[in-house]
Image: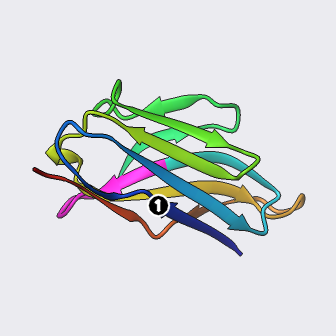
Amino acid sequence: QVQLVESGGGLVQPGGSLRLSCAASGIIFSIRAMSWYRQAPGKQRELVARISSGGDTDHADSVKGRFTISRDDVKKMVYRQMNSLKPEGTAVYYCNADVKISVLAGFRTFWGQGTQVTVSS
């Protein structure tokens, strides 16, 4: 199976920064897109950023200019640098990845368990 494990969450003051990491492990032939989602209390999970296998990125308008996404295909990791954090950024952040577990298999989407980010003074 495939496991995604996020790390790097925590408590940060408004205007601060955090770097989230997500490590993929297990039976992995290739990884296509990798994404970060977040779910704030009482709200639906929303896409924050996505990075393709070719490195093309896309960000939600609410985080453009403040957040960046990157990946390391050798380490099978995706990163999220979050700067100028705002209280409305408080949420559980999830990573997901479109993974192919063998040359004959199709791509499946796997999710991590999430990491809590709290932005508060």
Residue 68 is situated, as x and y percent measured from the top left of the image, at 45, 33
The foreground one among 98 and 75 is: 75
Residue 77 is situated, as x and y percent measured from the top left of the image, at 63, 51
Local SS, label 1: strand
Residue at the image position 71 percent from the left and 51 percent from the top: 75
Against 116, residue 121 (above or below) is above
Residue 115 is situated, as x and y percent measured from the top left of the image, at 39, 63
In this rendering, position of residue 103 left or right of residue 91: right
Give neighbour class at mark 1: few <14, some 14-19, many 20+ (Cα, 10 Å). Answer: some
Residue at the image position 36 percent from the left and 58 percent from the top: 9
In this rendering, position of residue 43 left or right of residue 116: left
The foreground one among 36 and 45 is: 36
Indicate whether residue 37 is drawn in magenta: yes
Residue at the image position 10 percent from the left and 50 percent from the top: 121
Q: Amino acid at mark 1?
A: Ser
Residue at the image position 51 percent from the left and 66 percent from the top: 112
Residue 13 is situated, as x and y percent measured from the top left of the image, at 18, 46
The quarter of the picture where the N terminus appears is bottom right
Query: Which residue in the structure is indicated by mark 1?
Result: 7
Quick one: which residue is furthest to the left in this view?
Answer: 121
The foreground one among 78 and 33 is: 78
What residue range appears in magenta? 36-45
